[in-house]
Amino acid sequence: MIDDRDLRELFSRKATEMHVERTMPQALSKRVQRRRGLIALTGVAAAGLLAVFAWAAVDSSTRTEAIPPSGRGGNEIDTPVAGQLPTPEGLAGIWAWDDGGTLDQNRLVLRFSLDGTFAGDSSGQLDTYPALLGNYEISGDTVRFMPDADSLHEQRACVAGNNWTWRVGIEPDGRMNIVSLEDGDGNCEIGLGTTWSFTRISPGSQAASSISLADESNTRVVDSVNPLRGLWLDTKTGRVLRFSWDESYAIDGSGRLGTHTEDAGQFEVDIKGTVRLISGSESRACPEGSTAVWKDVRIGSRTMHAIVDRDACGAETGTETTWILLGSPGSP
């Protein structure tokens, strides 16, 4: 029978056998010996589209050395997280990985539903073709993620059985802090002990309202559908808006985009920078055929500005609206 001491000796011997270039910087050498490489998570091409889900590189300063000596067990990591215990009600909504305070393009976005399901994506396809889809379970301060069985057939980023577990704390202002206790494999591996933070963006939260906009002094009038495509956030209202390659849109401020969407339909763009949103039969809050008109729609590197000229099923006529790009699906 192999005990813990035998395992430690085995790991020590294997680490000694690893070849590390002498010219390699000391810090990098240690990271190699600790097997702490960062893993990027990408989706797989399906139906002619590339669904990309990036676990973007995490700075080493945010990672902990509290690695369980026996491998993937989760209980040995004692890194605490700030916040209250997770509950379905506390998790419900859409969260964006803020990397400790920033919210750049193509950040991981997670949607938690009260029925115990979740979805995740970073390429602007959270409600159409998310890279992650499955179920979650809460036990005390931990949340375990279990990709759906159908993921294998749909070629999503993480397949059934590739589970992972986070210790989770939820703060009153809409911030969620996590530490990785159980890691997935390959595409789903972020490193045991990794710490991340998320901001609840829908429904809106205090943390989301404080997100700063990038300097957008150079903007241009939209004259085609191409620059609109992706997932957008209005930090003032908590609404999330998706424009797709097939010229469809969906918009929701309740944190249920893709499961109980408030408005959805088709959109049109003319060369003068006017965008029309025409509600379809699947729209929950707006009658079919309702039309909202945005004028002087201008795009920067990460923001979109517009004047609401008409809002058939809302109360925004005459107001200015500003959106932050969360993720873009790239070329079709």
Image (cartoon, helix red, strand yellow):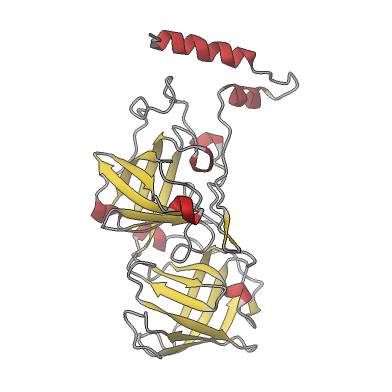
Q: Observer-nearest residue: 225 or 305? A: 225
Where residue 95 appears, x then y in whole percent? Answer: 40, 56
Q: In this rendering, is residue 189 above or below 245?
A: above
Q: Single out the residue that lies furthest toward the right.
A: 23
The mark total stands at 0
Where residue 17 appears, x then y in whole percent? Answer: 63, 13
What residue do we see at 50% from left, 38% from top?
Answer: 189
Task: Quadrant for the N terminus, please.
Answer: top left
Q: Observer-nearest residue: 263 or 313? A: 263
Task: Quadrant for the C terminus, please.
Answer: bottom right
Quarter location, residue 85: top left
Where residue 26 appears, x then y in whole percent? Answer: 66, 22
What residue do we see at 35% from left, 87% from top?
Answer: 313
Q: Is residue 25 left or right of residue 327?
A: right
Q: Can you see residue 157? A: yes
Q: Can you see residue 311? A: no
Q: Observer-nearest residue: 222 or 138? A: 138
Q: In this rendering, is residue 235 above or below 293?
A: above
What residue do we see at 65% from left, 66% from top?
Answer: 331
Q: Single out the residue that lies furthest toward the front.
A: 153
Q: Is residue 208 left or right of residue 40?
A: left
What residue do we see at 57% from left, 37% from top?
Answer: 38
Q: In this rendering, is residue 149 above or below 235?
A: above
Where residue 210 appears, x then y in whole percent? Answer: 42, 60
Q: Is residue 219 left or right of residue 101?
A: right
Q: Is residue 242 left or right of residue 42?
A: left
